[in-house]
Image: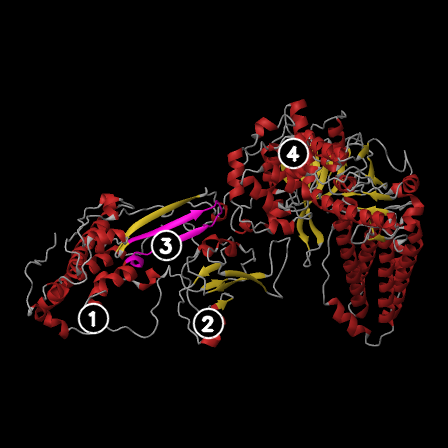
Amino acid sequence: MSDIDYKNRGSLLNPLKSFAFFGRPAVTEAIEPRPASANYRGFHVNDWTKCVGCSTCQKVCDNAAITMVRIPGLVADPVKGIRDERPAIDYGRCCWCGLCVDICPTGSLALSREYVHTCTDDQLDSYFVLPDSSGMHGQPFEKGWAKTADADLVDLDRQRMPELEPEQRIGNFAEMMLGYDDQQALLEASRCVQCGMCHDACPTHMHAPEYIRAIWEGRLEEAVAWIYQTNPFAHICGRVCTRRCEDACSIGHRGEPIAIRWLKRYAMDAVPHERVKQIALRDKVDTPTGKHVAIIGGGPAGLTAAFDLARKGHAVTVFEALSEPGGMTRWGIPEYRLPYDRIDRDIDVIRSAGVDIRCNVRIGQDILLDQLRTEHDAVLLAIGLQQGRQTRIPHSEHEKVFRAVDLLNKITAGEPFEVPHCAVVIGGGNVAMDIARSLARLQKQQYGHVNVVVTALEEQQHFMADPDEIKEALEEGIVIRDQCGPQGCEIDASGKLIGLKTWKVLSIFDENKRFAPRYDEAGETIHACDTVIEAIGQSADTALLGDALTEALEWNRGRLKIDNDGRTSETWLWSAGDCVNGPDVVHAVADGHRVAASIDAVLMEQGK
Amino acid sequence: MRRDLPEGYLDRVSKTLDYLESRLPDYDNLLFTNKVFVHRATGVGTLNQEQALEWAVTGPNLRATGLDFDVRRDDPYLVYDQIEFDVPVEQAGDAWARALVRRSELKESLRILRQVVTKLPSVGGPIRAPIPNPLAWNLPAGDVYTRVESSKGELAYYVVSNGGDKPYRVHVRGPSAMHAVQVLENLVTGARIEDVAQIMFSLDACPPEVDR
Amino acid sequence: MTHEGTAQNMERLRSKTSVREILEVATGFEAAARDFYRDLTPKVSKRIRYLVEELAAEEQQHFDLFSSLAQRNDITEQIQAEIERPASDSKFSDCLHLPDLGERPDDQAVLQYAMGREHAAMEHYTELAQTAPDGPIRDLFQYLASEETKHKLELEKLYYETVHRGGGV
């Protein structure tokens, strides 16, 4: 076995054979630290301009060596997903494994090639370090272990949701997005690092990390319970939410944000409706308070408030002017984005909480506001933005010039109207896309072709519409002509509408980012069409308040003045939703909760 | 694997192996064919196989008692099943036998490393398989014991999971933990005082492995 | 108001030979506009009254500015300094007719009217500056034109924010 002949017990002289050993030069090492190798895992460096304080490094650290420290004066912006916290490292615990670097969503964290630190007993705190980009001792060292594509522990790519191809969807109003299957939802949920930026950014502070976690753990009913804690428009927001959460998602800094909206949709679709109802109504109070609240408007703000108030034991009556509740989610958003049966489910949950929704009742006409006031303990005005703004450009009063919201209403109601052969839409927001895409479908159904042009002031990449909407509209054959400022409708000698005249927009914002379009008259274009649709904005119709109340109320730049709780200057009247805070479903939901809490507090105070 | 090897690394390894091999005659001259060393090591600190197994001795110290066992060969991990090497075994169980096992293992280690250098595939693509988000690992509850042959014997991890993303319990079995204290304690009982150092070094104890 | 009888106004202004006189006439126009908005205030819904009140305040500021300017001794120098800051023009309002506001005008109607008024004023002064001889008179007309242009641009921004920004009131 051994190549030493150990049976030979050796010789006393054998060591002398290596006498030459003594003549060899001694090995010397410089006392200076040697430069570390390229991938060395030394002390941390953290680029504070990139770091958003998401605390993912802290979570992944197996040694609990990382503490998040609040730094006063740093930017803290929940909407952008930035916290004023930065990681501090305890080098008494750190083992330099580099997991913090590998998982850092922004890529701000790296290990440097600096590895020497020593101190006396009284400086032991110097092992607790708040790394920034300047290095442990203020000396510049190159990065060692840093983020690479190979070692990245963040999954940057979102699970694609299957969808109908353009040719499959253009001739009908079937829902376009088909939903995640179990495996896709699981994989998508597993990308989440649980930083909670989404929760902070959401107007109603949905517990997204919790429901994503529950989905990942396969506990879908628990996910639904988390969703219902803050949002009774669960199906609706699972499909059409403006998703501030995804804008704030930490993964979005380098990759695609977690598909939070789609995960919510998955959980809601996966749990049977009867179970959802039971879960949603778990904390409903059984004893009536004897108080009665009237809510004007059956949209997200009004119905959220109604849901909250009913669960607290108040009698709630919602007065809806149109034939079905849901507000803009039903009457504005087309069916291919949000099927009506999903709206019905959300509303069924709200109704089953005991909310009395009376449709086809227009306050100010069928019932006067004064009557509501005398018959109820509180009144909530949640009327939304139902009136389409008009451009009032020359000839825009022509009978073939429509407001987008009016046509969308007609489409929802199934009211027949003459579908234009060739339509030009004015506006670059989601409503413009909704009407353009709806008309394209109707055209395809009735005439077999699509002929819709969308004109807007902005450049296409700055449209207010969701980029997905724009992409899908283009796929469906809609033509987008950006940077077009509407100047007038063109009419022929017989009074027939023949086109829209626009000027080329040179620039749209001034140096202070205020809207100030500048035009090039030479860039005049006539967009030939038989119908023009204005989709530039909406306003609230406050006529129902009547002259006396309008005069009595306080206003703030065209909107009802409300306090932080949504109460107007009249103590019996609250207001919430789009009509006071601008258009956004999830914002309206948040508003509904806030105003319900205020009404409940006031009513319970009165009841004592 | 987290990163690829740096440029030229394998050449440097080969050079180092050549250098180490060139030193072997020196070691032999100084120790293994040095009559003084051989004489002083023989019959000192003898451990018999039965005791060694009872005290959970592993590695070279166990093989010096005549037990032919090596995790790399008998419970292979990584690529050891594709590598040719011999497992040196001695019978006497004394300090000299332990020294001889280690001397022979120097050669085997050089042999193993040379094979690794030639067999290591050169990869053009990604080095690391995509690892799912470590904050969302779905680990089953349970326990696992896994071991490797280290220079001093079996280095093993015993990990218990209760299903969370971090272990419930991790125990590291450092091989020296067995022979550094209890074996030494027994072997030095009744030994001559000048042999204590000899016995200690022949067991090759690494103090940090004891402190687990 | 300034736009009714443009030619007449222009004649009045053209016949003025002193800087101070021109300023006095311009001040008079601003006072007329201010009074117009003040009269309009109770007629509009309280919801948009802020807009008319702001316009009246704006015209009052204009009025104050022109009248204080007229009283200064270093007026020529002052005007020189002001017109060196060029105000950029925009063609937006060019296609707008000045609407008849009717009984209960809404915010959009009020804004369109106000923009039209500023635009007309801007055009008056610009044209006057073009025909005036070099010297302080021309400088003054240019100054007035640039002031009106700035106001018009301000109003346009408000108009777009109110009407074209998806949300609104």
Q: Work out whether disc 1 and disc 4 sit on a shared chain.
A: no
Provide the chain ID for the residue under circle 2. Answer: A
- What residue does disc 4 label? A337
* Of the image marks 1 and 3, the number of the one nearer the N terminus: 3
Numbered circle sitting on residue B193 = 1
Q: Are marks 4 and 2 in contact (CB under 8 Å)?
A: no
Query: Element under label 4?
Result: loop
- What residue does disc 2 label? A137
Query: Element under label 2?
Result: loop
Specify start and end residues of the magenta stretch as a single range: B154-178
Q: Nearer the viewer, residue A195 or A288?
A: A288
Mark 1 to mark 3: distance in Å?
33 Å
Question: Residue A576, position in %: x, y?
Answer: 79, 46
Indicate which label's residue lies in the foreground, 1 or 3: 1
Query: Element under label 1?
Result: helix
Mark 2 Cα shell of 10 Å, populated few (<14), some (14-19), many (≥20): few
Mark 1 Cα shell of 10 Å, populated few (<14), some (14-19), many (≥20): few
Mark 3 residue type: Val
Mark 4 Cα shell of 10 Å, populated few (<14), some (14-19), many (≥20): some
Mark 2 residue type: His
Mark 3 Cα shell of 10 Å, populated few (<14), some (14-19), many (≥20): some
Indicate which label's residue lies in the foreground, 1 or 4: 1
